[in-house]
Image (spheres, rainbow, N blue to C red):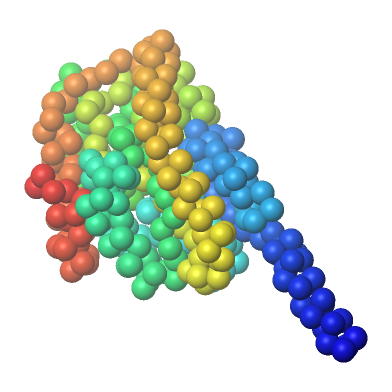
C-alpha cells in the first residue's frame, strides 16, 4: 500500500514539475552584415522581439556578422545546421536556389506574398533544395539604384562608365554599356576616393553608413528590383521546435512584418532627406529604366529555372 502510494505521489510530482523543468532553447543566428548597420538593424529587432516573448521557451543569439561566418557561407551554414538561422539576401544563395531571386522582382509586400501563395511556394523550394524554411523577410519596398560621382544628362552618358557592381546589376549594366567592377562593399570608399570607379550600384538605404554619400553626386531614379533579406531556418531545427516554441517564432514574424511597414516607410523618408541634405541630386530616367531592368531579369530567371513560370504569377500578378 505504501509502495503504491509512493509511486502515485511520485507520478503526480513529475506531472506537476514536468512543465517547469522544460528547457529554454537558444538558436544560433548569423547575418550577412554587422547587426548594427542599416540592413542588420531590422534583424536585431526581430531577434530582440523573439527573445522578449520567448523568455523561458525560446531564445536566439546572433553569433556575429560576416566576421563570424562569411556572408557567402551563411546559406551553407544553415543548410548543414552549423547555424540554426540566418538573415541574408537571395543573391548569396542563388547557386543553391536560383528561384529565390524572383522575390527581388515583386512589388508585393511580404503579407501580400503570403496571401498570393508566393511565400509558400518559395518555402517549398527552399525545403527541397536547401534544407531550410522561410521564416520572414524584410527590405521589400526598398529599390536598388545607380549612384554616380558625376552629373549626367541622359542614360547614354553611362555608356563606358566604370561602376562598382555585383551580380544583381549585371544585366542592366550590360544593357546600359556600363563596365561592372565587383568591388567588396568595404572597399567602395577607397575606390571612390581614388576615382577608380565613377559610382556604384547599391540599394536606397545605407549609402551613408560607410561614408560614400560625401563622394556621391547623383542618384539615378527610379530604382529597380527590390531589396529582399530572408530569414532562413534549418529545416531540422524548425521541425524539432515544440508547438510552444514554434508559436514564439510565428508570433514574432507576424509582429515583425506588420511593424516593418511603417518602420520601412519612415526609414526611406529619412534616407531620401539625408541624401538631399548631403548634396545627392536625383536624375529621373523615366519608368523605362525600371521596366527594362525587370524584364531582363525575368527573362534570365526563366532561362535558368522552369519553376519560374509557375512562380511568376504569384509574385507579379499584374504581368
57 horizontally vs 32: left or right:
right
In the rendered view, tell whether residue 253 sits above or below residue 132: above
Counting from the top left corner in percent of width and height, residue 93 is at 40, 60
74 horizontally vs 199: left or right:
right
Counting from the top left corner in percent of width and height, residue 207 is at 44, 28
Counting from the top left corner in percent of width and height, residue 280 is at 35, 16
Give the quadrant of residue 45: top right
Task: Indicate the quadrant containing the N terminus: top left, top right, bottom left or bottom right.
Answer: bottom right
Residue at 32 percent across and 45 percent down: it is 110
Residue at 33 percent across and 40 percent down: it is 140
Instruction: Specify whether residue 289 is in view.
Output: yes
186 horizontally vs 268: left or right:
right
Residue at 31 percent across and 60 percent down: it is 120
In the rendered view, tell whether residue 129 sits above or below residue 149: below
Judging depth in this view, the residue of 6 and 233 nearest the camera is 6
Counting from the top left corner in percent of width and height, residue 277 is at 41, 10
Judging depth in this view, the residue of 118 and 227 nearest the camera is 118
Please identify the residue farthest to the right as the structure is shown: 2
Amino acid at each position: 500500500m505504501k509502495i503504491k502510494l509512493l509511486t502515485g505521489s511520485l507520478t503526480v510530482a513529475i506531472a506537476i514539475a514536468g512543465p517547469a523543468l522544460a528547457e529554454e532553447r537558444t538558436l544560433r543566428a548569423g547575418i550577412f552584415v554587422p547587426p548594427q548597420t542599416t540592413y542588420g538593424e531590422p534583424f536585431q529587432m526581430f531577434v530582440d522581439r523573439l527573445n522578449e516573448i520567448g523568455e523561458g521557451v525560446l531564445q536566439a543569439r546572433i553569433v556575429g556578422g560576416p566576421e563570424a561566418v562569411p556572408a557567402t557561407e551563411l546559406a551553407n551554414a544553415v543548410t548543414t545546421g552549423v547555424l540554426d538561422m540566418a538573415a541574408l539576401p537571395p543573391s548569396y544563395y542563388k547557386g543553391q536556389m536560383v528561384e529565390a531571386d524572383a522575390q527581388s522582382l515583386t512589388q508585393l509586400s511580404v503579407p501580400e506574398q503570403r496571401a498570393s501563395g508566393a511565400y509558400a511556394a518559395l518555402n517549398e523550394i527552399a525545403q527541397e533544395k536547401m534544407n531550410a524554411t522561410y521564416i520572414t523577410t524584410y527590405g521589400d519596398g526598398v529599390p536598388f539604384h545607380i549612384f554616380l560621382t558625376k552629373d549626367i544628362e541622359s542614360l547614354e552618358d553611362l555608356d563606358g562608365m566604370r561602376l562598382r557592381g555585383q551580380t544583381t546589376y549585371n544585366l542592366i549594366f550590360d544593357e546600359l554599356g556600363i563596365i561592372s567592377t565587383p568591388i567588396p562593399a568595404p572597399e567602395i570608399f577607397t575606390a571612390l576616393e581614388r576615382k577608380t570607379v565613377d559610382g556604384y550600384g547599391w540599394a536606397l538605404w545605407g549609402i551613408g553608413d560607410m561614408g560614400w554619400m560625401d563622394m556621391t553626386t547623383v542618384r539615378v531614379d527610379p530604382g529597380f528590383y527590390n531589396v529582399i533579406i530572408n530569414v532562413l531556418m534549418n529545416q531540422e531545427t524548425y521541425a524539432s521546435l515544440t508547438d510552444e516554441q514554434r508559436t514564439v517564432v510565428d508570433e514574432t514574424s507576424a509582429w515583425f512584418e506588420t511593424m516593418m511597414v511603417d518602420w520601412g516607410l519612415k526609414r526611406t523618408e529619412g534616407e531620401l532627406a539625408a541624401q538631399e541634405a548631403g548634396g545627392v541630386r536625383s536624375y529621373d530616367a523615366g519608368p523605362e529604366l525600371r521596366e527594362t531592368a525587370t524584364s531582363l531579369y525575368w527573362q534570365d530567371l526563366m532561362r535558368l529555372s522552369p519553376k519560374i513560370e509557375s512562380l511568376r504569377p504569384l509574385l507579379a500578378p499584374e504581368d
